[in-house]
Image (tube, helix red, strand yellow):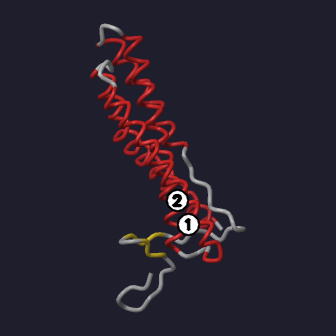
C-alpha cells in the first residue's frame, strides 16, 4: 500500500483494509489456522451443556437440540471462513493466472455457505418444539465462536510476531 508520501510498505489493500501480502505459494492457497475457533467452539459447547444441564427440565432433549444447531452454525462459520479466504486471494490478485479457478471456488464456497444458512433457517422456522434455551445458546454460537476464536487467534499471531522479533534481535 502506498501512503500519501509515496512510500510503499508492501501491504495489499483489500476493500478498506490494508493487509500483509499473502506469501508466495506454489499455486495453492495458504492454510488457515482454524484451531483457535475450534477451541472456542469446544469451550462454548462445554459451557452451554453445563448451563442446559442445570437450568432445563429436560436436559437430554435440550442438549441434543443445542448440538444440532451448533453443528449447523459450525458449518455456516466454516463455509464463511473459506469464502472470505478465497475472496481475499481473488481480490489481492496474487494468483492472477488462476482467476477462473478462484472464481469457481468462491462460487462453490458461497453456495455452500448459503445452503448451511438456509438449513439453519429451516430448522429454526420449523422447530416449534426446540427448547428456547437451546435455541438461544445455539444461535449465540454465531457470535461467541467468532469473537473468542478471533481474539485467541490474534493473541497467537501477536505471540508469533514477538517470538520472531526476539529471534531476529538475538541474531
The crowd level at tag 2 (other Cα within 10 Å; few <14, some 14-19, many 20+) is some
Q: Residue at x 51, y 73 (%)?
A: 92
Tags 1 and 2 touching, CB below 8 Å? yes
Residue 94, by quadrant, is bottom right
Nearer to the camera, 55 or 152: 55
Q: The N terminus is located in which quarter? A: bottom left
Distance from Cα at disc 1 to Cα at disc 2: 6 Å
Q: Residue at x 50, y 45 (%)?
A: 78
Q: What's the residue at 31%, 31% (across, down)?
A: 125
Give the residue displayed 37% in from the left and 11% down from the top: 59
Label 2: state its secondary structure. helix
Task: Name the quadrant of the C terminus.
Answer: bottom right
What crowding class fits label 1: few (fewer than 14 Cα within 10 Å), some (14-19), or many (20 or more)?
Answer: few
Residue 56 sits in which quadrant?
top left
Where is residue 107 drawn, in percent x and y? 52, 59
* Residue 98 locus on image (x, y percent): 64, 72
Secondary structure type for disc 1: helix
Q: Is residue 131 left or right of residue 18?
A: left
Q: Mark 2 points at which residue?
A: 107
Q: Mark 1 points at which residue?
A: 103
Percent x, y of residue 150: 42, 48
Q: Which residue lies furthest to the right in this view?
A: 26
Q: Residue 63 carries which label?
A: none
Amino acid at each position: 500500500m502506498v501512503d500519501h508520501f509515496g512510500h510503499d510498505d508492501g501491504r495489499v489493500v483489500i476493500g478498506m483494509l490494508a493487509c500483509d501480502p499473502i506469501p508466495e505459494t506454489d499455486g495453492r492457497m495458504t492454510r488457515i489456522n482454524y484451531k483457535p475457533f475450534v477451541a472456542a467452539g469446544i469451550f462454548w459447547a462445554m459451557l452451554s451443556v453445563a448451563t442446559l444441564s442445570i437450568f432445563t427440565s429436560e436436559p437430554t432433549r435440550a442438549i441434543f437440540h443445542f448440538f444440532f444447531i451448533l453443528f449447523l452454525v459450525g458449518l455456516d462459520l466454516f463455509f464463511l471462513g473459506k469464502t472470505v479466504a478465497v475472496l481475499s486471494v481473488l481480490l489481492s490478485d496474487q494468483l492472477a493466472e488462476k482467476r477462473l479457478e478462484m472464481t469457481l471456488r468462491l462460487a462453490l464456497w458461497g453456495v455452500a455457505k448459503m445452503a448451511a444458512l438456509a438449513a439453519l433457517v429451516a430448522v429454526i422456522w420449523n422447530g416449534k418444539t426446540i427448547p428456547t434455551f437451546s435455541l438461544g445458546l445455539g444461535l449465540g454460537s454465531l457470535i461467541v465462536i467468532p469473537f473468542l476464536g478471533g481474539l485467541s487467534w490474534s493473541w497467537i499471531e501477536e505471540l508469533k510476531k514477538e517470538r520472531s522479533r526476539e529471534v531476529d534481535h538475538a541474531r
